[in-house]
Amino acid sequence: MNSLLDHLNAPQLAAVTLPPVHALILAGAGSGKTRVLTTRIAWLISNRQVAPPGVLAVTFTNKAAREMQTRLAGMLPINIRGMWIGTFHGLCNRLLRAHHRDAGLPQLFQILDSADQQSAVKRLLKSLNVDDEKFPPRELCHFINAQKEQGLRPAAVEAWDDWARKRVGLYEAYEAQCQREGVVDFAELLLRSYELLEHNEPLCRHYQERFRHILVDEFQDTNKLQYKWLKLLAGGGANLFCVGDDDQSIYAFRGADVGNMADFEREFHVANLIRLEQNYRSHGNILDAANAIIRNNPSRLGKNLWTEAGSGEPVRIYESCSDGDEARWIVEEVKALQRDGHARAEIALLYRSNAQSRALEHALFNAGLPYRVYGGLRFFERAEIKHALAYLRLIANTDDDTAFARVVNFPARGIGARSLENLQDAAKAANSSLHAAIPQVAGAGGARLAAFAQLIVTLRDAAQLPLPELVDHVVELSGLRSHYQNEKEGQERLANLDELINAAASFVAEEGTPNQDGEITGEFGNDLSSFLAHASLEAGEHQAGEGDDALQLMTVHSAKGLEFNVVFISGLEDGLFPHENSLTEDKGLEEERRLMYVAVTRARQRLYLSFAQTRMLHGQTRYNLPSRFLDEVPEELVKWLTPRAGRGGFAVPSAPTSFGSTPRRSESSGGSGFRIGQSVMHPKFGLGVIVNAEGGGTDARVQVNFGVAGMKWLALAVAKLEAA
DNA sequence: TCGGTTCAGAGTATT
DNA sequence: TCTGAACCGA
């Protein structure tokens, strides 16, 4: 047992061996957070402070949950299945399946992913004849989710004008539609299970008494509802052990509320705030840079990373003329790194927004360097997979209109918009599902619809087949297989459908067996419905090809939690990073700074920061100032690879020839000596870049981006502009 | 039902 | 500039 605690540093040890009390662990980047979390659980169990069923561990991603499970399995000689370890959504799903009746849901309720939700909303707007210009489906979804994440049902939402009242009405109608169809969206999983416990005292007490230790990963990412959910479950005297890092809170835009950390500390009278500040990942200079940057944020809980690893290399900064130049420079640098023996997979190219990957990919492709871009379509989000799943969903529940609408005419079977409209009217009149309304539709369209209904019946007859065979059967009988066989580029899709059959097989092998942890029975309806839930809750790997030695390209957001020997952070320009939209948001700049902090702390040995004077964005050449975050890195940590830019000597204006091929207006403004893209100094506004010019002679005006001070039009005859 | 055209929008993302 | 979605005509 002692080996459990070997090699823990003092604060880690203190956290792991805390007595049964509430605790907040402030875990800096690379400080062994997951290790503390898992060791804590293992320690509690091996010291008989709690039995496995008394443990509830919550994460945000399936990946994190899996990692925790794997590590625990390696630490404990016992079966860990009695513990509840999973994502918020996965655990809520589990609760709702077990108590579907109390929660007011059919046993086989389906889970809508974001795309499904949006199409459900579109369908709703259409059926209610609502103008989708006034209520764009995207925004409406966002609104609905935001309300749910605050725990607000329509009746509780405040609305002051007609438009707002109408919007709340749509929220209400959406709920009714979901209820009728027997489907729940992601936010509903949370809210519904919260309400289930809140309104059902015996049940709530059951779980409160069961879970003695509740452990939360990435606590800074919890939203209001998730925090309430935790509070409710811990209300029976369980111990809440929350691990998080306020400096790495980068998800406010999707509802995360860092304030939960301070609230938790206060509301639970947390006497044990433990800081994990020793970093096992990065060299000293990198950490010092990160510390210096984040120090500019007010109202932090406070933390300073340190390492025993030595200061290592300086942080390298590179200035280039254009985004293309930046990409080419990165390529050359990567080649040099390769010659020095660095594996490509250990080099990451990070950027603030996805659009920036294009220039990088272009240069990498031309240089023949293998790379892998994170993000994008995932397995269960592919069209062919969603089609197959829609048939499976109809087998499980014919009332699932989202699934129905998706495949009623796919592959094409002559059921056009007209027939569908008739069907929708009939369904609305009878307040029934689309499927149930089929007999009401007459004519040729009605006949074709009836044939489709018959297809579903035939498919349902196969429902008792083993799951993989059922999937195969569905792919065949639905016509999906022959459809893609006849399509020119259907080969990959066919392969994906085969992969779906494989996925079903391995799902049954791994998870399809009934749970035997003495749980309240009826947790999952059957293999089919649990497979469908799995498909919704876990969209699958981003892309294959993980094995090859490829450069890693991703946004800073997706890099959170990862680490690399070498990291490039590109596009460090004001407006891009920090993103311009963030400047007008409340606490926006602080979140961007945390994002920068996350980016910097991904690097183990070497960190490159780069920016470009010009960048093509939305079809226009933009002239940006270097990111203000660059100024926050102390000089003594930095090695400039190009002559130093910035204060006073914003230097190295590149040769004019290196500018974009077609300047939008005259490049010089009337022989004034200034040109677009040039850095200038203004006595009041400071350093800026000329981004546009008008007029000439005594009438010459230039538009200058002064970064923090904003964008200004200045008359050259009046303004005291100097070349900088 | 398809292919082409037009138009808006362009930030980060897990479940 | 580029993309994806919506739309229209054959």
Image (cartoon, coloured by chain):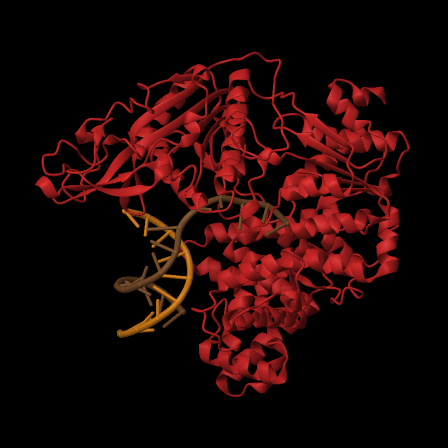
Chain colours: A red, B brown, C orange
Against A700, is A131 above or below?
below
Against A685, is A471 above or below?
below
Q: Residue furthest bottom?
A: A442
On screen, residue A7 versus residue A158, left or right, reads right
- Residue, x 41% and y 20% (percent of image)? A316
On screen, residue A529 versus residue A21, left or right, reads left
Which quadrant would residue A271 be assigned to in this image?
A: top right
Q: Nearer the viewer, residue A7 or A343?
A: A7
Instruction: Give residue A460's position: percent from left, percent from top.
Output: 68, 69
On screen, residue A227 versus residue A480, left or right, reads right
Q: Nearer the viewer, residue A35 or A639?
A: A639
- Residue, x 50% and y 46% (percent of image)? A586
Against A364, is A113 above or below?
below
Q: Nearer the viewer, residue A436 or A203?
A: A203
- Residue, x 21% and y 29% (percent of image)? A722
Quadrant assignment for the C terminus of chain A:
top left
Q: Nearer the viewer, residue A721 or A600?
A: A721
Q: Residue furthest right?
A: A48
Res A77 seen here: no
On screen, residue A721 versus residue A163, left or right, reads left
Which quadrant would residue A61 be assigned to in this image?
A: top right
- Residue, x 63% and y 53% (percent of image)? A535
Which quadrant would residue A274 be assigned to in this image?
A: top right
Q: Residue furthest top?
A: A310
Instruction: Give residue A554's position: percent from left, percent from top.
Output: 47, 37
Instruction: Give residue A174's position: percent from left, percent from top.
Output: 60, 69
For the image, the number of numbered tags is: 0
Instruction: Give residue A593's position: percent from left, percent from top.
Output: 50, 34
Res A413 seen here: yes
